[in-house]
Amino acid sequence: MQQTSADKVFNPPTLSSREFKRDNPPPTEDYREKLFELEKAGELEVQRVPEPYVELETKYGRIKKIPYQMTWHHKSCGQCGHIPGYSTAIFWLNRKLGFDYHDPRDQTSCTAWNYYASSTSNSAAQAGIAVRNFSQAKIDGYFPVIHCGTSYGHYKETREQLLHYPVLRRQVRKIMDRLKMPFVFPEEIVHYSEWVHAMRDRIAEMQVLDLSNVTVTVHPACHYHKLVVEDAVYDRDLFDGQRTAVISGLVEALGARVGDYSTWHDCCGFGFRHILVSRDFSRSFATTRKIERMKEEVNPDVTLTHDTGCVTTLDKSQFAAQAHKRNVGIPVMSDAQFAALAMGAHPYIVCQLHWHGVDMKPLLEKMGIDHKKAWAEFEVQAERIKAGEIEYISWEEADA
Amino acid sequence: MSIYADAKYSEVPVETKQALFDEVKADMRYEHQLYGCYECGICVAACPSARFYDFSPRVFAQVMAREDVDTFYELLNDSVWDCSQCFSCTRCPRQNNPGAVITIMREVAVNHGLQSAKEALKSYSRIIYKIMSTGTQVAPDMLQPDFFPDWGPDVKQVSENLDVWRRCVPPETMHTTELAWDVSEKTRLELYMIWKLTGNLEMIEKIDEGIFMILEEVMEELLEENGYDIDDFENLLEEDEE
Ligand code: SF4
Ligand code: SF4
């Protein structure tokens, strides 16, 4: 066929002919090298990722180590407080995979939700809080894995500041001396969704549900992949290495379908301050820019995300939107809950789906879960607690 | 002079505005957050707040780079609290971080107890109390229909069954209603000491005296009970400045 001049001028590569290649060195400095330099100079102690670990590629091609086990679970206040099945599912996955983990009482929130909402703090306090948690993890003998996307983002920001400002390191040193604790920083800041991504093949091996008829949309958390982009996990085989691979990699491994939509990169509308005291903004943004777009372009069975604020905003915003006849009604949960369900976790005792707003029943039916039976089982346990027969549901019961 | 014909706050002396501006600029983080601006608007396209408010990260980058203290003062009072702090604006081709400039501006607004900051945080104060005293920011007992009326009937169900439903959650650390998880007393006290050592209580006093007084009373009693001498935990940032 003869080429027209238009072909010569406009000839973009097709997706199948495009090859993923990194030809430039990373545009950023390697934070690990800097951390080790500071350790050598005696300024702080770096906690190494325990062996064995999985190596994953990050945005600029550097390798990140993700530990299998010996993990110190830095919990999230929004997850534990309002979406308890989120944290429970992460622990349940660790238990099912037979890993040693620690769920500490000597952990505080990163307090960054408050900081991004109100700015009633400062760099020294925020760095002090981060390092106190990290030092405690080291003392407890486990390596920190961060549950919340905002904690993860904020700790990455804090690391940048600690690496660049000697005055901040001096202040943190003084704080830690007063608390009689060491100044420790981990070699890697690991988000639990990276751990889920690293374990996705093992999770798929233990899968008991067929998810081939389930369509998923993915919402990536801003503080995961936009706030200090360096650490986020990318995979050349997913989205051509152009978008973070977490969540989507898991969905693929589980045999469900990932549906793409045009506002993938948009925020959820959480806003930190807004979700608590100015929710008209959060609701409008979540429904019109995310949920309605997904509904129109993909009509998924569920949307999965990997952060506290995103689950909350995307899920809870849909109720009031119905009054305005908006095109809503997509169940929302975390990748960890979805993975646990796929492995046969109880939808109410482990995944605690009754704390979510949007009706999950059509999704559960499609996944092959008998939700009526499951709810009856949950109620039996709740009645036993009310009757004083048992104090709480134990892990043994949840694991069964 | 402001770039806007209908500029507000002309009654505020320029020295006041300049002093606040200088404070933002003096923050150690500032020089790594603003490198000049192409006016390309990429940040605005990515910004959720720009879609629903009269708000623009580009304007922040421009005004700060031009050192236009009048418009800075207007943004400080009328715009900073609209930001979602999502950092979508870090897509900037100049490596600017308008969201992070806004974080610093908010800190300065709070430190000076600006009326606009007090108003923006009015119904938020009880959350400050929660995080500073317990170490967890949101707790199960905050799920009340009067606080979240737009979240549907599930909130009412959760609040009615709270105690039992919390005990239906398997992790032992999560059988709590007033805290997101069971933070040990020692750890809560360590957190409070960090707030003390970094001058955060003074900051809270400026923004909400009532919350400050309750916080101080409750936590300092706890510190004393546990044998800590509160005078050991004076603001060390001030020490650092000296
Ligand atoms: S951090 Fe603020 S200015 Fe930046 S994109 Fe988000 S809402 Fe907009
Ligand atoms: S993206 Fe950067 S350069 Fe472009 S308008 Fe925004 S701040 Fe300026």
Image (tube, rainbow, N blue to C red):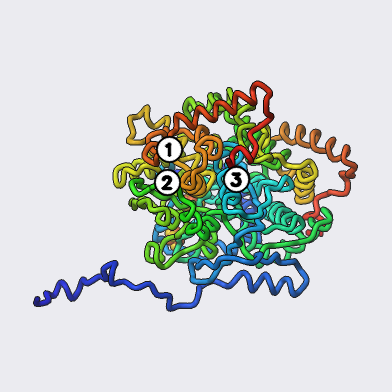
Q: Is residue A231 left or right of residue B42?
A: right
Q: Quadrant of residue A55?
A: bottom right
- Provide residue B128's location: percent of width, then percent of height: 66, 38
Q: Quadrant of residue B6?
A: top left
Q: A29 or A346: which is nearer to us?
A: A346
Residue at figure coordinates x 19%, y 74% from the top left: A9
The reply to the same-chain question for discs 1 and 2 is: yes
- Does mark 3 have its CB less than 8 Å from ligand 1? no
The reply to the same-chain question for discs 2 and 3 is: yes
- Provide residue A243's location: percent of width, then percent of height: 42, 61
The earlier-in-sequence mark between 1 and 3 is 3
Write down the chain letter for disc 1.
A
The amino acid marked with disc number 3 is: Trp
Q: Secondary structure at mark 2?
A: loop
- Provide residue B31's location: percent of width, then percent of height: 59, 64
The earlier-in-sequence mark between 2 and 3 is 3
Marker disc for residue A378: none
Q: CA distance from mark 1 to mark 3?
A: 35 Å
Check contact, mark 1 vs mark 3: CB within 8 A: no
Image quarter where the C terminus of chain A lies is top right
The amino acid marked with disc number 1 is: Ile
Q: Secondary structure at mark 3?
A: helix
- Provide residue A339's location: percent of width, then percent of height: 48, 49
Q: Which label sits in the foreground, 2 or 3? A: 2
Q: Which residue is mark 3?
A: A113
Q: Residues within 10 Å of mark 2 (few under 14, many from 20)?
A: some
Work out which residue is located at the far top of the displayed protein and give it: A387
Give the number of callouts.
Answer: 3
Q: Residues within 10 Å of mark 1 (few under 14, many from 20)?
A: some
Residue at figure coordinates x 39%, y 47% from the top left: A210
Q: Residues within 10 Å of mark 3 (few under 14, many from 20)?
A: many
Q: Which residue is mark 2?
A: A209
